[in-house]
Amino acid sequence: MLTEPQLQALIKAAGADNLSTEHATLWAYGMDNSRRHAVPDAVIFATGHAQVQRIVQVCQAQRIPLTARGRGTGTTGATVPIHAGVVLSFERMNRVLEINPDDRLIVVEPGVTNAEVQAAVRPHGFFWPPDPTSAAFCTVGGNLAYNSAGPRAVKYGTVRDNVLALRAITGDGRELRSGTRTTKGVVGYDLTRLIVGSEGTLALITEATLKLTPLPEAIRTARALYRDMQSAAHAVARLMAQPITPCALEFIDGAAMDMIRGHTAADLPAHARAMLMIEVDGSPACLDAALASVRRAAEIDGLLEWREAADPTEVETLWATRKALSPALRKVAPKKINEDVVVPVSRIPELIAALEQLSHAHAIPIINFGHAGNGNIHVNLLLDPDAPGAWERAHTCLDDVFAKVLALGGTLSGEHGVGIEKRDFIERELDATAIDLMRQIKQVFDPIGILNADKTLPLFEGAPINPQPPR
């Protein structure tokens, strides 16, 4: 609970109109898109760089935990204020500060949504490659915090590859500028890429300079259906080994197709047990040859159907299956466990086979879909949490999933981040030296640990803010 002097210091730093202690507001800002919830002591709405710096300085001086938040679309509990304190919402810092087509960049505040960035630069003939599923709602600040990329990462890279520079406030209230406005620059350590993906544990981003990419002249879309997931997985490896890199390469498995047949008008033959959605982009004069190359790679034993969209309406029809998946999952299993593991593309067939075995072994239905071109698989464990033993079986199954991913040379998170949900698994992937160096980096940026305390890195004794169990 904040003391009255602490509250008054925060009001002075933030402005009375930008701070709330109303119960309803505190309750709403205590959650994200995970099942986690913890009520903060205050919610502050950021309005500008100088104001954010004042707020951080007060929190640092008063040892008040501080959790940054965009729109709360994250799934790992990273914006849940597990130590109460202050939630600092960036939704009001939503200005586009500059669009510079000649230098192919846009400068924005962190509360601008991904969709607003795309709308702002499209008239100039550009786009920003990161396109997570929640693009209509999620903020650029959240994209930066999680390094959330989406389907286009297979060709255009992740958020880290599409950010030029940042302006931020460290955990001890210092102003920081990192990066350049140029696509080349090797002066000093790359703090920009360090801060991107750090989930608000190192510094609070107040301004971002994003690298833009010219819109493609044309896009061609195709759908490939396979008799089993192993065939589709082998096709993915072949697709990524040929010279034409798709701008999207998505897949869903047979269980997902079964579930959504009642939620889409798309024709899905019952004997098809896996689907790939493939898009290529570029010059219209080259796309016929590009799509032909992609088709040759996809034509392996097990291919049941190859279908190319002839017009925008058919493109929409082909994508209808993939777009129907998330709503169907929410309806069938609103309390599902959703993970986003990554393995080398060549190991996707082994992972898919292992997931099928684990589903049977633990009696937990598993639905898989994701960004196949990066090996980024969204593993969805469907469960009824009220059924006896369901949570125990699901978490045992998840433990086995993570073990298999690491054994295949993969990583435990591709774009959802770590937050609280994966924090206790991190020591399986990172060695002791790496974790120790990361803790030292955290202490340099945030000496007393006020920023998003006890997230991302494993808990340890002697942390600056005494760890408390998630509430």
Image (cartoon, rainbow, N blue to C red):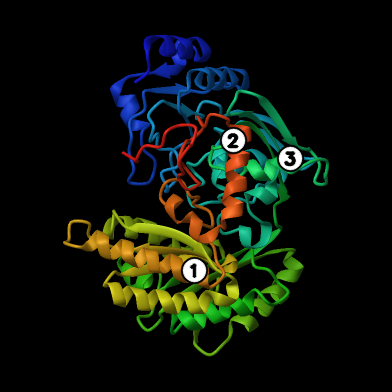
Question: Amino acid under label 2?
Answer: Gln
| Depth check, front residue: 306 or 13 | 13
Q: Is residue 288 left or right of residue 235?
A: right
Crowdedness near tag 3: few (<14), some (14–19) or many (≥20) residues, C-alpha within 10 Å: many
Q: Is residue 281 above or below residue 61?
A: below
The residue carrying mark 1 is: 405
| Depth check, front residue: 312 or 414 | 414
Secondary structure beneath label 2: helix
Q: Where is residue 396 drawn, in percent x and y?
A: 32, 65
Q: Where is residue 119 drawn, in percent x and y?
A: 60, 41
The residue carrying mark 2 is: 443
Q: Do tag 2 and tag 3 residues touch (Cβ < 8 Å)?
A: no
C-alpha separation, residue under disc 2 versus residue under disc 1: 30 Å
Secondary structure beneath label 1: helix
C-alpha separation, residue under disc 2 versus residue under disc 3: 32 Å
Please say whether residue 119 is visible from this viewpoint: no
The residue carrying mark 3 is: 105
Which is in the foreground here, disc 1 or disc 3? Answer: 1
Q: Where is residue 428 drawn, in percent x and y?
A: 49, 60
The image quarter containing residue 165 is top right
Residue visible at 53% across and 53% down? Answer: 415
Q: Where is residue 52 drawn, in percent x and y?
A: 57, 22
Crowdedness near tag 1: few (<14), some (14–19) or many (≥20) residues, C-alpha within 10 Å: many
Residue visible at 72% across and 65% down? Answer: 284
Crowdedness near tag 2: few (<14), some (14–19) or many (≥20) residues, C-alpha within 10 Å: some
Quadrant the C terminus occupies: top left
Residue visible at 51% across and 79% down? Answer: 349
Question: Amino acid under label 3?
Answer: Leu
Question: Amino acid under label 1?
Answer: Val
